[in-house]
Amino acid sequence: MDELQNIENQQGNGVLPCVSHWVSFDFMKLETRPQKYGKYLICRKDGKIHWETWNGSGWAYNHNEIRYWAEIISPCG
């Protein structure tokens, strides 16, 4: 049995535990920026949520619109 099935069996309902959290984003504060290049789930100031690419120094979308980001970790490792 693989690790994913073990977690599902421990939960007893096929629901996996939360694997991420929202990080408040302020471009001027380095500690609020993602640490590595990749796709992140973002929440804009208008409330819309979608995937966005962090290129290592900024978002592909206007960073003034982005308020929160989250890294989603695959349950399959």
Image (tube, grey):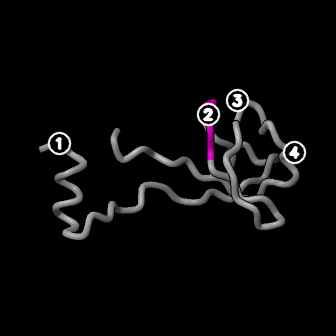
Q: Nearer the viewer, mark 2 or mark 3?
A: 2
Q: Quadrant of the N terminus?
A: top left
**35 is within the stretch colored magenta:** no
Q: Which stretch appears magenta?
A: 36-40
Residue linked to disc 2: 38
Residue linked to disc 4: 62
Q: Nearer the viewer, mark 3 or mark 1?
A: 1
Q: Nearer the viewer, mark 4 or mark 1?
A: 1
Q: Tell whether 45 sits left or right of 73.
A: right
Which of the two labelled residues, at mark 2 and mark 4, occupies the earlier sequence position? 2
Residue linked to disc 1: 2
Q: Tell whether 63 sits left or right of 6.
A: right
Q: CA distance from mark 2 to mark 1?
A: 27 Å
From this view, report whether residue 71 is shown above or below residue 44: above
Q: Amino acid at mark 1?
A: Asp
Label 4 Cα crowd, 10 Å radius (few <14 / some 14-19 / many 20+) = few
